[in-house]
Amino acid sequence: MNTIPQHILDALEGWNEYILIGHREPDGDCTSSGLALNWFLERRGKRCHLVSPGPFQRPELDTLSSHFAAHVPKDIDRDNTAVIILDCSTIERIDYLADEIKGLPVIVIDHHSSGNSFGDHRLIDDTAPSVTFMILHIIEAAGFEPTEKEAQTLLFGLATDTGFFRHLGAHTPETFEAVARLTAAGANPNQIHRQMYGGRPLASKQLLGLLMHRARPYADGKVMITFETLEEQQQFGIENRDSDSLYQQLQSIEGCEAVALIREEKPGECSIGLRSNFFVDVGKIALELGGGGHARAAGLSWQGSRQSAEQHIRTALEAAVHAVTDK
């Protein structure tokens, strides 16, 4: 993690009121970075508002989503308020909230290298494993330590964005040094693992089994693709999705390098989740198709049929796999 610039620390002190916003369809890192920074600023005497465009579709976020409002409060003091946008590489990722914050100073804290530059104060570190990792360093650079509640939330975000650390490679000691400091402050990895993977209903495992059964190999088994239909979304419910477990199972298949999960979200609209094991940069593929993410975990939205989404993503993944294996 690079040193936190003084202008960022000054920006987090310079206003009386802050609006903290993450991206649409928030994940654990986005949600947790907002919560932890909100609590830190509040204990420094700031008035804070957590706002999200939603929807909160991940079951591991059930206990966290109630902290977020859907709109910016109308009674803010616009002369003494700044916006903090977290885990967003473009302003478009906060959806309709971009209109609600017009005219306010913006601080951006993110770990994605792709996207369009925006904001008045920017802290971008694409070497950071999560934005929560960056928030920990902000707290420490300001001369504080995280409280137990902050530490638990920061470790949850770090764990979710790294797939409980399985996306990390060699030479990443800073991440585990951060974990050591968070557990010393009271964070509980066992509870976080249970929050991420435990307490799921039988329906979630039935859906997982269905998607596993449907998975098809391509490129001599190096690419695995599966899909969820709109009817299955209605049958099983969004709350019973268990994407991370599905990715783990598919990525553990012998010879598999890249995985795609295509979901029909609405008629004519799909989401595509991408994961890779070692060589394929799925973040680059997602960016080329209008999405984004990291080298080993990324995603995008697709306007069109599930069949057209599968055709395009299969072509892209097969080309990427051949590019690295045919050398």
Image: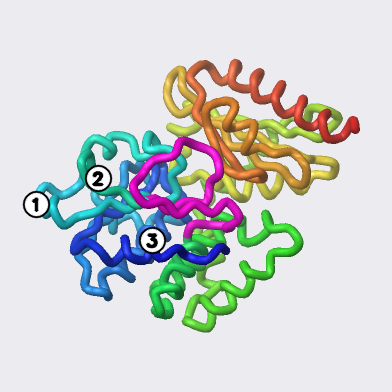
Q: Which residue lies under the disc numbered 2?
A: 70
Compared to residue 100, the image places residue 108 above or below, namely: below
CA–CA distance in space, label 3 to label 1: 26 Å
Q: Residue furthest right?
A: 327
The verdict on residue 111 being magenta is: yes
Q: Residue furthest bottom?
A: 184
Residue 289 vs residue 166, the one in the foreground = 289
Kind of residue at disc 2: Ala
Q: Which circle's residue, 2 or 1, is located before the other in the chain? A: 2
Q: Majority secondary structure of the magenta segment? A: loop
Q: Secondary structure at mark 1?
A: loop
Q: Secondary structure at mark 2?
A: loop
Which region shows up in magenta? 108-131
Quadrant housing residue 39: bottom left
Query: Where's residue 303, x and y in %?
Result: 48, 19
Q: Which residue lies under the disc numbered 3?
A: 8
Between circles 2 and 1, the one closer to the viewer is 1
Kind of residue at disc 1: Asp
Is the residue marked by circle 2 packed among few (<14), some (14-19), or many (20+) residues within 10 Å?
Answer: some
Question: The N terminus appears in which quarter of the rendering?
Answer: bottom right
CA–CA distance in space, label 2 to label 1: 15 Å
Q: Identify the residue shown where x is 76% and y is 48%.
A: 252
Q: Identify the residue shown where x is 42% and y is 47%.
A: 26
Query: Where's residue 255, x and y in %?
Result: 85, 41
Q: Residue furthest front?
A: 6
Kind of residue at disc 3: Ile
For residue 75, which numbered disc appears in the image? 1
CA–CA distance in space, label 2 to label 3: 26 Å
Q: Which circle's residue, 2 or 3, is located before the other in the chain? A: 3
Side of 122 where 201 appears, left or right:
right
Q: Identify the residue shown where x is 90% and y is 33%.
A: 327
